[in-house]
Image (tube, grey):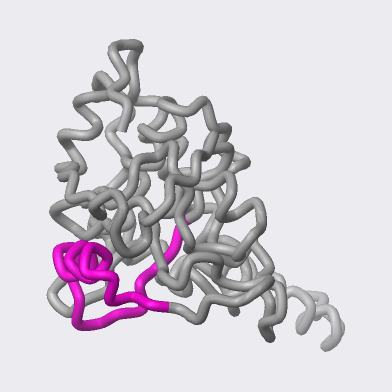
Amino acid sequence: MRLLPPLLCLAVLIAVLLGCESTSPRVTGWEGRLGPVPVERKVLPVGMLQEVRLQQDMITKGTAGRKTFRRMNPQFITIHSTQNYTGNAYNHALALKRGALRAPKRRGGNRIGFLTWHFTVQDNVAIQHLPTNEQGEHADFDGPGNNYSIGIEMCEHRGNDLARTIDNTAKLTAFLMMEHQIPLRNVVPHYHWPRQGLNPPNKNCPHFLLDNGRPGRNWRWFLSRVEAHYSRLVPGPVPRI
């Protein structure tokens, strides 16, 4: 029997190990909890919203982060994570309405003195804070992330099922893609939008869907989940939210 040279053996071993790591442990865990998307289970757009249990609890017009109306024609969907381990979706809705999430207003930075976004999602509900035709303040100051994208925050509080939160977010994203004719390539992480004057400019967000702070296999898995839920949608009335 002919033995392989030591260097060739090492190369084969490295290739095997790399192949074994082709699936992220986080993805394996989430898939184990969720299972594959039931693409054969078709739904109308309103049915998708019922699955995510959408509730509207808007920031009041003329108050806090809605003192002025800033129209938006959304072209992107930006995915965030709250990195708040004590606050659920209802807590975030209340904080936004009270104007508790302040940020320094400055030239080239936050334009309104508040943080605002459109939806907060957890395992059993998605709460809407802003109409999707109105700008939020969640991505990149006076850049395309704020001017043209819908912001979705995923909750991370203790007791929340993160896998189901991600799946709920994928469903909501699929609905918004249909509502606004947004292509999958325009579904991006917060990381996608550099923030002028900050170091690092690209935020590690949503951190649990990035790999070493950058989009990689975890993010590609999330997009595949969005695409699969989008394939479940059948033509029908599309609520404007």
Quarter location, residue 30: bottom left
The quarter of the picture where residue 152 lies is bottom left
The quarter in which the C terminus is drawn is top left
Instruction: Say whether residue 233 is visible.
Output: yes
Q: In this view, does 59 lie above or below 159?
A: above
Residue at figure coordinates x 59%, y 79% from the top left = 212
User: Where does the image place residue 219, in percent across and percent down from the top left?
Assistant: 53, 58
Residue 40, how many percent across, how many down? 29, 23
> In this picture, is 75 found above or below 1?
above
Give the residue drawn at x 33%, y 48%: 130
Camera-side residue of 14 and 226? 226
x and y percent of residue 132 in the render? 40, 39
**Measured from the top left, where is residue 211 in percent x and y?**
57, 72
Q: For this rendering, which residue is in front, 162 or 96? A: 96
Q: Give the range drawn in magenta.
A: 79-102
Residue closest to the far top: 236
Left or right relative to 32: residue 212: right
Q: Does the magenta stretch include residue 89?
A: yes
Front in this rendered view, residue 83 or 41: 83
| Residue drawn at the location 21% of the way across and 62% of the way down | 93
The quarter of the image holding the N terminus is bottom right
| Residue at figure coordinates x 15%, y 45% from the top left | 55
